[in-house]
């Protein structure tokens, strides 16, 4: 079928935010809903791919036809991703926290009445997209990243493409005015070494199915 453009392809998708524990009851997180990443996993499965979705905490159902692995932290997400290698394609749509609290308190932080304010020390999280893109032995044939920016979206995406070493960046504007974070629609730019392709605003599910078709085209072109 024309819809089975990814038949026989092993694909990994990351989606959602990560939660980085501060103490047993508190965490650092972001506003990612997981809608775009989950839609990509579902569309890829519908196109015949063997899909594993590694999802941070979201309030979405597991997509049909997809093996879904649930994680909380960036470190757990990386471990789940590495466990799944080798794959043909990786799409990193998760909004992974760049930093986590350096030490997780084993007990809930308490006000002690003195007015002393706890100081959070942060440390850097592993970069999953970069790890996959620069993997020495198991780099996927195609690595796709996302770039959520609030300004100079394309410029930032170009820099990210080079820094991380991925093949394609799907860049979108997540400034509050765009309504993209948590919303159902998206307007993206596909940034690769070959150039920039800007798509009209459409539903995230539509972005997902077009991206899957685009990935199918790229794999076909690379095989020629
Ligand atoms: O650098 P920045 O976080 O803006 O890059 C966004 C891209 O990198 C997304 O594809 C995101 O999923 C991925 N990423 C990642 N691991 C991180 C940070 C970002 O996979 N720790």
Image: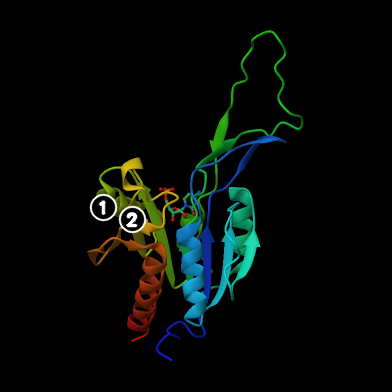
Relative to residue 176, is residue 115 drawn left or right? right
**Which residue is painted at 60% across and 55% down in the image?**
77
Quadrant location, the C terminus = bottom left
Can you say whether 224 is above or below 77 in the image? below
Q: Position of residue 73 (x, y in %)?
A: 62, 48
Residue that sits furthest to the top in the current view: 114
Contact flag, marks 2 and 1 (Cβ < 8 Å): yes
From the viewer's side, name the closer residue of 101 and 130: 101
**Which residue is painted at 48% across and 75% down in the image?**
44
Cβ of disc 2 within 8 Å of ligand 1? no
What is the spatial separation of the Cα atoms under label 2 and label 1, in whole angstroms?
Answer: 7 Å
**Which residue is painted at 51% across and 49% down in the image?**
96
From the viewer's side, name the closer residue of 135 and 43: 43
Disc 2 packing (10 Å; few <14; some 14–19; many ≥20) = many
Q: Position of residue 21 (x, y in %)?
A: 65, 38
Relative to residue 196, is residue 73 drawn left or right? right
Which element type, helix, strand or loop, lies under badge 2?
strand
Quadrant location, the N terminus = bottom left
Can you say whether 125 is above or below 136 in the image? above
Q: Earlier in the sequence, mark 2 or mark 1?
A: 1
Q: Can I make out residue 139 in this image?
A: no
Q: Which mark is residue 171?
A: 2
Q: Position of residue 201 (x, y in %)?
A: 29, 60
Residue that sits furthest to the bottom in the current view: 1
Which element type, helix, strand or loop, lies under badge 1?
helix
Q: Which mark is residue 74?
A: none
Quadrant of the rendered image containing residue 213: bottom left
Disc 1 packing (10 Å; few <14; some 14–19; many ≥20) = many
**Which residue is painted at 62% across and 33% down in the image?**
102
Q: How many marks?
A: 2
Q: Which mark is residue 154?
A: 1
Q: Position of residue 210 (x, y in %)?
A: 35, 72
């Amino acid at each position: 079928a024309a819809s089975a453009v990814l038949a026989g392809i092993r694909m990994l998708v990351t989606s959602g935010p990560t939660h980085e524990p501060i103490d047993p009851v508190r965490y650092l997180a972001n506003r990612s809903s997981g809608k775009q990443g989950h839609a990509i996993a579902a569309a890829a499965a519908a196109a015949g791919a063997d899909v594993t979705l590694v999802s941070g905490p979201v309030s979405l159902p597991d997509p049909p036809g997809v093996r879904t692995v649930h994680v909380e932290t960036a470190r757990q997400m990386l471990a789940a991703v590495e466990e799944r290698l080798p794959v043909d394609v990786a799409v990193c749509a998760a909004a992974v926290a760049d930093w986590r609290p350096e030490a997780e308190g084993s007990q809930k932080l308490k006000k002690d009445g003195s007015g002393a304010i706890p100081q959070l020390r942060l440390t850097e999280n592993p970069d999953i997209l970069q790890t996959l893109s620069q993997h020495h032995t198991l780099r996927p044939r195609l690595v796709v990243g996302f770039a959520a920016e609030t300004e100079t979206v394309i410029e930032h995406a170009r820099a990210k493409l080079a820094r991380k070493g991925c093949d394609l960046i799907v860049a979108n504007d997540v400034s509050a005015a765009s309504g993209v974070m948590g919303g159902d629609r998206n307007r993206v730019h596909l940034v690769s070494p070959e150039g920039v392709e800007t798509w009209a605003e459409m539903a995230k599910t539509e972005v997902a199915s077009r991206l899957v078709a685009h990935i199918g085209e790229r794999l076909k072109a690379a095989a020629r």
